[in-house]
Amino acid sequence: MNVSRRTILKTGLVAGAAAATPGMAQGVVQTERWGVHELVFEGPRHGNPVVDVELAAVFKGAGRTIRVPGFYDGDGTYRIRFSPPEIGDWNWETESSASELARQRGSFACVAPSPGNHGPVRVSADGYHFTYADGTPFRQIGTTCYAWALQSDAKCAQTLATLKTAPFNKMRMLVTPNVAAVATDPFARTGRGPRDWDPARFDPAYFRRYEDRLIKLGQLGIEADVILFHPYDEKRGYNDMKRADDERYVRYCAARWGAYRHVWWSMANEYDIVKTKTVADWDHLFQVLVGADPHDRLRSIHNLNIYYDHRKPWITHASVQNGAAVLDDNRAAIHREFTLKPVIFDEVVYEGNSTQRWGNLTGEQMVERFWWGLIGGTYVGHSETYDPAQNADTSWLGQGGTLKGTSAPRLAFLKKIMEEGPVPGIDPIQHLWDYHLGGQPNAYYLKYFGAAAPTEWRVRLHSRKDAPKHRFRADIVDTWNMTVTPVPGEFAMQQIGDYDMGDPARPMIALPGKPWIAVRMVKI
Amino acid sequence: MNVSRRTILKTGLVAGAAAATPGMAQGVVQTERWGVHELVFEGPRHGNPVVDVELAAVFKGAGRTIRVPGFYDGDGTYRIRFSPPEIGDWNWETESSASELARQRGSFACVAPSPGNHGPVRVSADGYHFTYADGTPFRQIGTTCYAWALQSDAKCAQTLATLKTAPFNKMRMLVTPNVAAVATDPFARTGRGPRDWDPARFDPAYFRRYEDRLIKLGQLGIEADVILFHPYDEKRGYNDMKRADDERYVRYCAARWGAYRHVWWSMANEYDIVKTKTVADWDHLFQVLVGADPHDRLRSIHNLNIYYDHRKPWITHASVQNGAAVLDDNRAAIHREFTLKPVIFDEVVYEGNSTQRWGNLTGEQMVERFWWGLIGGTYVGHSETYDPAQNADTSWLGQGGTLKGTSAPRLAFLKKIMEEGPVPGIDPIQHLWDYHLGGQPNAYYLKYFGAAAPTEWRVRLHSRKDAPKHRFRADIVDTWNMTVTPVPGEFAMQQIGDYDMGDPARPMIALPGKPWIAVRMVKI
């Protein structure tokens, strides 16, 4: 990802004195579509600007008016970050409770995105998949490194180097630490104890550091699923603040990062074991987030035991923890029935050597779960808990670093299969009738056998009587050894009974009798 | 069920002239708890009393005040039906837009229920099962005969005779016909065409006839899941009325039948293919129903393709159609995660010889689905589509009559197993970890093997380290041949790892190598 930043430096004291910036072309300030147009102002330093000063800018362009809140970045600096959704001329004017920040005006030209900038990921028009704003399908292959961005510079660089050659295009990451970290203080400290900090004073250095990692992730083309709250820090209490403090924190994160097109919001990890918050609290914080994020980034919340009600309108997609749902495509598909939204199984047990049952999958088992999820029309998340000391905290899951497992190359292979598949994605086909097929009816079918090792398969694809019958080609896909072996010849489909089609002349496909095999059948 | 009816005949013209009724004992009118206390009045006949006359009674007793709407039953007769929820003295006073029906007063004594009257079925305190008001668990074994109550008297009698010896304790039944029926006109006819009827004028004879069948069902101890709307009568259009007509119809059914303690409300069958109503319409009709039913009977709605949002507060339990969910206990259990309510799979494909795929299960397959549902902590519904002409319309499903299938005795056996099990019911045990166990942790475990025919099973039951370990006995349950074979001796449970328990001296149980086997393990 190419994070396009165009900075206009203004001082609040000298209105209109726009400094020349790298974004100027023939005197016109330019920002690419879906890039970040950042306004920087100097303003009041006295008191607590986070609490005392309100600041926003109203952007007008392409027939739209978008009000974007700003944030205080310390040392008298205020910023407003806007990601223009449309090409064309945009004008802006600030609003502020501080007179020197109010009624500032400017304009810029939003130009075509540079190569590789596909815009933010949205829910696809059919409602169950993801698509970049430019129409490119987003095929989710997620991973989780909760506190990677809070580690040392060297460790962060190592994680980024790992990600550069890994298949993952989405990262789940906490804002505040859950495991040992270098960066531990998002708020200004007031003493030496773990709870000695002021929830009304953000430490800009902490957020700037996080943001640096966030942007580097985006430059690798990886979506950042930013997790705002979690239940793992009873020591410091960042997740146990008062409502007004939670609201301020959510607004700050939204103002600070919402303009980055690769940001997604995960309201919480394992929300249901954050002892200090009820479902009503979470609902309220979603309202705050929706109001604070004019960029309308994707929003979800992740559970331990109790599913949140994903049909609530502020939820864009389901983020689910379930250790067994993706052992069966049909279990996965049921989640779509209930949510009527895209489903990502963000936690399905991790690959690793943990003594805990939530971190002990083999690579084969990890990959199998991705495949069942795919056949069920859903998406799956990876992580790794391999550690010499069997300590998940210091593994990829906790801190990032390097991958030790065997699943990642197979997930890259899976992603390629997905990219060769239908747009916007693979749906379950007749799962209410247990076909165990994914795809798009009459065009593309994917059959997966998991750990079973059949030596043949009777080709019986769902098709209604009134659907035209086509010729299909077949591939045998070895999902572990990463091979695609075409089945010679074609299958001339004919209707079989009321619901199925097959080629009577070629009823069976021979299979290699190995586990982790899939068959792909595509209309010629 | 003993439907207790106590009739007080009053004429609106002679206030207070209560006639002697069978419910009088030493001059005190008595109605048993959860019975029906019915007030009958004479009132206006002119105009359209259904539309013109409002009538209700306010009942006060046991510290409660309950306002119960009445209904017009034709020929100048008005009725108010109230089911007293508590023992003690109740006073009542009417309210009406018609002066001769207003300010009538009376009282009665609510006495202890007669044997067999357990009160209405409610959701159990834990939220996932059903319990009668007196605390007796209700173990749902449902069936469906959509239009049985609309058939000839002889056919209705035959259905009731069948039900008398069948295991079913819940019947799903439509108010208006979906198949050939004797009773076809719930509304007053205005001409000879199928759509020539007046939605503002109920035909009392139709509803009295239905009510007669309804009461007889209750007398057999069978709950009546009364389905108010359905998508199968485009010819007559009873399900395509205007909103005001729908509201009047819902209020009429609620006033007429809500006092019967065995009535449940199913807002619609396959709601999502009723073309003339949207989800917002259904939501609205639920609001109407909640407001019209002071008895607060159970409420659900049944889908074809699109699950209704069962977390909505007016839904008491999920009523689900899914042809494959109960092929796997875990798929079933996922439904509990989403709904946080009791789940009944009311349609899971029927036992029968239909040429349609929704009506072609063997008896074995029908029974298997009940068992998987049970292990998943849910409930299942039966019906039969056996017919010589393979016509589901004229089978048990459509019209009632006699059972031809082989599942019913096995469902009776299953019910006995359920009755011997934990209260209020069987929960899935660690389904997120794919244990395939139902029961209550550390007390009762049920393992089911479905069509598999294992010859042994390694006893590995979920138990936390901190849970005391007990001795257990085991039974091998042949769910098809209906036998329970005790395994000799005991199992002295010890912790195994972090999550499990077993008896190291007896790790395995030998099994008969037949399909449809379960193992039951109960704490001694």
Image: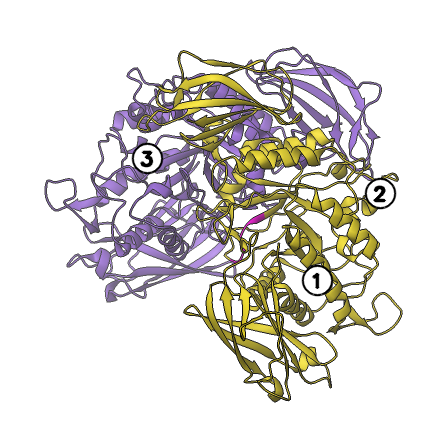
Chain colours: A yellow, B purple
Tell me whether the residue at label 2 lies in contact with that at label 3, contact meaning CB atoms closer than 8 angstroms: no
Instruction: Give x and y (percent) for residue A507.
Output: 45, 13
Q: Is residue A352 magenta?
A: no
Give the labeled residue for mark 1: A211
Circle 2: element type: loop
Mark 3 residue type: Arg
Residue at screen point 60% across, 32% down? A371
Tell me where the magenta segment starts and ends, as one range.
A314-318
Name the mark nearer the viewer: 2 or 1: 1
* Pointer 2 local density, CA inside 10 Å: few below 14, some 14–19, many at least 20: some
Mark 1 residue type: Glu
Name the mark nearer the viewer: 2 or 3: 2
Give the labeled residue for mark 3: B213
Asked whether residue B422 is in view, the answer is no
- Determine the main secondary structure of the stretch shown in magenta: loop
Vertical relation: A416 (above or below) B81: above
